[in-house]
Image (cartoon, helix red, strand yellow):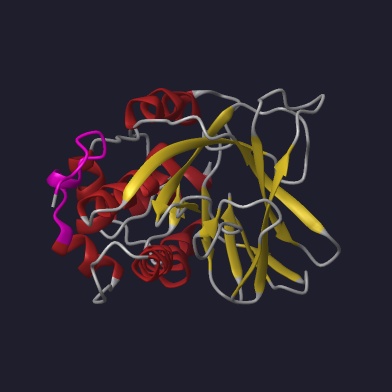
Amino acid sequence: MTTNAAWGGDQLDLEAYLARIGYEGDRRPTLETLRALHAAHLSSIGFENLEIVVGRPVLLDLESLQAKMVKQGRGGYCYEQNLLYAAALDRLGFRISGLCARTRMGERRIRPATHALLKVQLDGEDWITDVGFGAEGLLEPLPLRDGVESHQGEWAFGLVHEKETETETAPETWVLRTRHADDWFDLYAFGTERRFPVDYVVFNHYISTHPRSPFTGQMVVQRPSRDLRRTLIGREYAVTRPDGTREAREVSPQELPDLLATEFGITLSAADAQAVVTFHER
């Protein structure tokens, strides 16, 4: 199988990755395989920024990503998740491109383009696939088509092709949305300019170090499923349901390691567990 050196598929321990996500299905580069891989990865590897919390740099080389997310039972945020996933897709023969998005989360103000996602070309059609957006992210790939809507579990997602506006000046802007109880809710806006792992290294430096980044001052852990969205922001653990109801509670620092394991599937070493507790005792 020919791989693209940019995505590092030839460096991936494919058997270990597939075992980590519990995937035993077809390995041909088809839409069915893409859907199954997306779902398996998402259900097995949690979204988290704990490297920042415990005081380590976020490393994006494939060896580090495999050591952390495959061997150690950890999770990661968008660059980590989608780069590991991209290496697997590349190794399996999918035609992939990197993209970058501006997070909206219901707002139209211009934020920096710092979210990574992937585009896959299959049988002449483009699909977006993204395992790194956290609790409100896609559960399955979505065709890159204006007006498309998709019901994934109990959630609905849609894509709209936005024309140039006063707030977005890119010549081509796509918006990923999810349906909340009252209306559609914009998640992020993206263009189709190709991005590469080296671009994500630059973006990652900002996200993991800048004081205005949402990931540098607090723990952010999230996990979507087909009927629930779980979040742990700082010490607030919350569960959101498709009808918009939300249950939240404050978690003591000592509870955090067990909660990370049971609700988010994130395994911490003893040293990292203590570092997380200490961080939240301050």
Q: Where's residue 78, x and y in %?
A: 45, 44
Residue at point 32%, 47% (across, down): 95
Relative to 240, is 106 above or below?
above
User: Furthest-right residue in view?
Assistant: 182
User: Quick check: 188 left or right of 282?
Assistant: right
Q: Tell me, yes or no, if residue 80 can be seen here.
A: no
User: Quick check: 266 left or right of 5?
Assistant: right
Residue at point 76%, 28% (across, down): 164
In the rendered image, which quarter is residue 35 located in?
bottom left
Please report the bounds of the magenta region as a residue range: 2-14
Viewer-proximal residue, 119 or 226?
A: 119
Q: Where's residue 254, x and y in %?
A: 47, 60
Viewer-proximal residue, 179 or 271?
A: 179
Magenta-colored stretch includes residue 7: yes
Viewer-proximal residue, 106 or 236?
A: 106
User: Furthest-front residue in view?
Assistant: 124
Viewer-proximal residue, 61 or 24?
A: 24
Name the main secondary structure of what is drawn in magenta. loop
Q: Where's residue 159, x and y in %?
A: 66, 52
Q: Where's residue 71, x and y in %?
A: 19, 57
In the rendered image, which quarter is residue 237 located in?
bottom right
User: Quick check: 96 left or right of 203?
Assistant: left
Residue at point 41%, 22% (across, down): 202
- How many numbered marks are there? 0
Relative to 128, is 224 above or below?
below
Magenta-colored stretch includes residue 177: no
Q: Tell me, yes or no, if residue 102 can be seen here.
A: yes
Relative to 242, is 82 above or below?
above
Residue at point 44%, 45% (across, down): 118
User: Quick check: 22 left or right of 104?
Assistant: left
